[in-house]
Amino acid sequence: MKEYEIVIIGGGSAGLASAIEAYKNGCKSILILERDKELGGILLQCIHNGFGLHMFSEELSGPAYAERYIEQLKELGIEYKVNSMVIHLSKDKIIQYVNPTEGYVSVKAKAVILAMGCRERTRGAIAIPGYRPSGIWTAGTAQRYLNMEGYLVGKRVFILGSGDIGLIMARRMTLEGAKVCGVAELMPYSNGLPRNIKQCLEDFDIPLYLSHTITNIKGKDRINSLVIAQVDDKLCPIKGTEKEFEVDTLLLSVGLIPENGLSEEADILLHEKTKGAIVNESYETSVEGIFACGNVLHVHDLVDYVSSEGMKAGRAAAKYMKGELTQKEGFQTEGKDGIGYVLPHKVNVDNVEDKIECMFRVTGIYKKAVIRVYKDGNLFKTIKKQHMAPAEMEKLILKKEEIEDIKSVLSIEAGYE
Amino acid sequence: MTKKEMACIVCPMSCHLEVTLDDNNNMIEVIGNTCKRGEVYAKSELKNPVRMLTSTVKLEGGLYKRLPVITSVNIPKDKLFDVMKEINKIEVCAPIKVGDIIISDVCGLHADIVASRSVERTDGDNRTESNTCNSK
């Protein structure tokens, strides 16, 4: 069986960044396994601009952003295989994959980096009532069809969910001549970035129905109309508020789920909120030597953050290879009131270089609010925040000397002064 | 004097801007931006809103049938559909290099439509020059 120092599962933004960083930190025996026809992952279908402001101080399209990393990877001569689907991953780091040229192959790795990304939630995940006709797509599938294959999936469109992919598809389909009748969002706030509400909906006068959901889908072969209704504060539809739209297409932008089938097979512990692995400061999972980064770990809204997380995981995996990571429990992190989750979940200060970045999401909209940071239950820091929303990931940077005295738990809380 | 709230669209940070306007809709002050570009955006959005436009053109000889393209600079918001019409007339052949000009000075807006990725020829015929073929 062929052996590698590091095998990376997934050649998207997280996988690419982690490979490059691991290589630069001394690991030369690396293999990336990618199931699609080329490297780049979801970036290849995200043809809109706005990528790379943090990483390159430029505003690039998704494919152009991916190309920067792919070029670098090729220059370094890092090995990768496309059309290669990993089907099994074991705790002892044996990876089995299939591809059309080699058939069924097993390889052994000293360290594994999980970078499989995420999947879209489908109609089945949210149980919309009504008929089951054709013409109902997840927004990302419609995006791939339009931007890579060249097919517009419909002419009169309604979008459920205000996630960024849905908003971006509303603009994209409008520009290509489709009529987007509206976007319905179950929550009283949008789940997309404010810039996308502005430039994808408001610019084209596409109405956004907050606190609304779909209550019926009509059409036997192809969808021909759908009904939306307002919901009350328990998210139940209110009778008498129904509106009907004649459409031939429904796009769903109702959330993403990290794709952790392989992680579960390797007995990696997952977090209830993020649906990704539980990781420590080195992005190492509960299985020693298996690391995770990017959307398979927790769903991000900015690719720049995915790349930077990939770099952290790549650097840590390289340190692990050199025996420079110490294995110790360390302290936990926790999200208190108003915080959905905090990542990393555990911190061993010995492995922290000079600072640690804690990523977290709030559970509601906060204006002119504060973030409170507690060390072992004692208030340590209060940070003012003009605006926080569940759609925008927040970052708290703590210096190593600030966390060295924490014994059991670092807590973050959102609230008002 | 009036106040106006807007979301900055310059980058995904989506800063929440609070703009103070005088009686002639001129900007007096903007707060909430975390970089200089937010101020520039607010000013332009009030007087002459501009956008980057991204789309695709037909592609022959590559792994996929579409080539993603982007405007080289911002264009006026009310010209988006005119530019889309021009983009949809174009067909190109691989190989393509990222940054290749696909349409120069589109609609006389002093903006080019450029390739936003590179594409190799799938039949291995990687001529160095990229060529616009069959422009309809």
Image: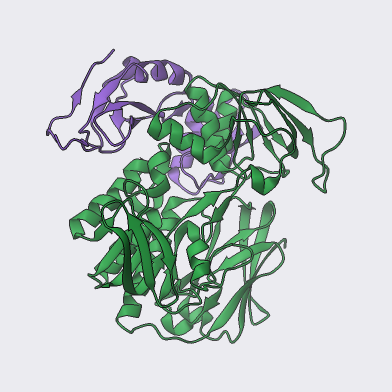
Chain colours: A green, B purple
Q: Nearer the viewer, residue A111 or A99?
A: A99
Q: Position of residue B65 (x, y in %)?
A: 33, 30
Q: Nearer the viewer, residue B57 or A209?
A: B57
Res. B1 image quadrant: top right
> What residue lies at 35% left-to-right and 79% top-to-bottom?
A320
Question: Can residue A396 be seen?
Answer: yes
How many marks on residues?
A: 0
Q: Position of residue A64 (x, y in %)?
A: 32, 42
Q: Quadrant of the N terminus of chain A?
A: bottom left
> What residue lies at 62% left-to-right and 65% top-to-bottom?
A341
Residue A19 located left or right of residue A197: left
Q: Nearer the viewer, residue A367 or A159?
A: A159
Q: Quadrant of the C terminus of chain A?
A: bottom right
Q: Position of residue A129 (x, y in %)?
A: 75, 38
Vertical order, A44 against A293 (above or below)? above
Vertical order, A386 against A280 (above or below)? above
Vertical order, A327 against A218 (above or below)? below
Q: Position of residue A329 (x, y in %)?
A: 52, 85
Question: Can residue A195 be seen?
Answer: no
Q: Nearer the viewer, residue A59 or A165?
A: A165
Residue A216 located left or right of residue A137: right
> What residue lies at 49% left-to-right and 49% top-to-bottom?
B34
Res. A155 image quadrant: top right
Residue farthest to the right, as pictured: A239
